[in-house]
Image (spheres, rainbow, N blue to C red):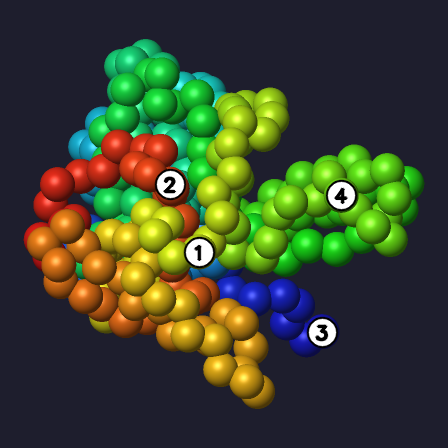
């Protein structure tokens, strides 16, 4: 019988470079399970508990901590030690009363400490949208989740004010809409990929060229020190209009 499905194991050498692990100390490392984030854009819970936060010394200890229901991701208990955690996810350690938000940095991903109040919401970027049955517009987010927006007339959806690449502020864990940030000039954004990953500032200009997809539009971002960076629309994440809706680490501004 032929092999079915992909590999369930991962060696340390080809693992994502931003994972804080020793490449030659051991041969194998935990492989994230299929979930809301891809392998190259996530940290499995074992890596977070053992190598980032240091609350576990071994993979076995990390697995026990997770199986006991002591870890929450976006307000929900996650018992799988290989659960993938990615950008804007909120990780909570209830016993220690510590909360973190996953943010992009020059090294890849980092866990930024946040308050308990800030851990009650999450920012999600709209990757796609479509009309579904029963008079709803479905918004598909960057973390694999979706939201149904009720509209009176699907052919003329006045209630649908959301566009692709806009950001929606959602409460946790019930995911009710708390706010909406349009992706436009002067919006406050953070760059999530490319050579300028982790940089943040305001959008100065969005250059959309004919014949190109909107996701490939060139975006110019200016930080508070007047430094400018260019990337594509696919790599920017709106985090506020007049000011960021989330707290940000100071270090990401200068890397």
**Which of pointers 4 and 3 indicates the residue nearer the eye?**
4
Question: Where is residue 108 shown, x and y percent of the image?
Answer: 26, 57
Q: Determine the secondary structure under disc 4.
A: loop
Q: First in sequence, mark 4 or 3: give its number.
A: 3
**Which of pointers 1 and 3 indicates the residue nearer the eye?**
1
* Number of other residues with Cα within 10 Å of mark 3, as a class: few under 14, some 14 to 19, many 20 or more: few
Disc number placed over residue 158 in the picture, else none: 4
Asked whether disc 4 touches disc 1, contact meaning CB atoms under 8 Å apart, the reply is no
Q: First in sequence, mark 2 or 1: give its number.
A: 1
> Quarter of the image holding residue 136?
top right
Q: Read off the residue under disc 1.
A: 184
Asked whether disc 2 touches disc 3, contact meaning CB atoms under 8 Å apart, the reply is no
Q: Which residue is drawn at 79% across and 36% down?
A: 150
> Quarter of the image holding residue 113?
top left
| Most foreground residue, 83 or 221 | 221
Q: Read off the residue under disc 2.
A: 240
Question: Cα distance, mark 2 to mark 4?
Answer: 23 Å
Question: Cα distance, mark 4 to mark 3?
Answer: 55 Å
Question: Cα distance, mark 2 to mark 1?
Answer: 11 Å
Q: Which residue is drawn at 33% across and 48% down?
A: 188
Question: Cα distance, mark 4 to mark 1?
Answer: 20 Å
Q: Can you say which quadrant of the picture contains the N terminus? A: bottom right
Disc number placed over residue 245 in the picture, else none: none
């Amino acid at each position: 019988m032929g092999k079915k499905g992909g590999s369930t194991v991962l060696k340390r050498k080809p693992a994502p470079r931003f994972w804080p692990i020793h490449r030659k100390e051991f041969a194998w490392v935990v492989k994230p399970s299929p979930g809301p984030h891809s392998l190259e854009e996530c940290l499995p819970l074992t890596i977070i508990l053992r190598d980032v936060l240091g609350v576990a010394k071994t993979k076995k200890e990390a697995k026990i901590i997770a199986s006991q229901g002591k870890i929450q991701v976006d307000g929900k208990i996650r018992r799988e030690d290989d659960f993938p955690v990615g950008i804007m996810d909120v990780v909570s350690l209830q016993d220690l009363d510590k909360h973190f938000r996953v943010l992009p940095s020059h090294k890849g991903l980092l866990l930024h400490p946040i308050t308990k109040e800030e851990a009650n919401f999450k920012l999600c970027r709209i990757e796609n949208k479509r009309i579904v049955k029963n008079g709803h517009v479905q918004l598909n987010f960057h973390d694999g989740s979706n939201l149904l927006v009720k509209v009176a007339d699907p052919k003329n959806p006045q209630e649908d004010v959301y566009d692709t690449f806009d950001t929606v502020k959602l409460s946790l864990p019930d995911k009710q809409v708390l706010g909406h940030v349009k992706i436009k000039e002067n919006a406050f954004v953070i760059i999530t990929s490319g050579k300028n990953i982790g940089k943040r500032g305001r959008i100065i200009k969005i250059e959309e060229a004919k014949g190109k997809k909107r996701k490939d539009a060139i975006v110019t971002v200016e930080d508070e020190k007047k430094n400018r960076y260019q990337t594509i629309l696919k790599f920017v994440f709106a985090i506020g209009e007049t000011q960021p809706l989330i707290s940000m680490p100071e270090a990401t501004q200068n890397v």
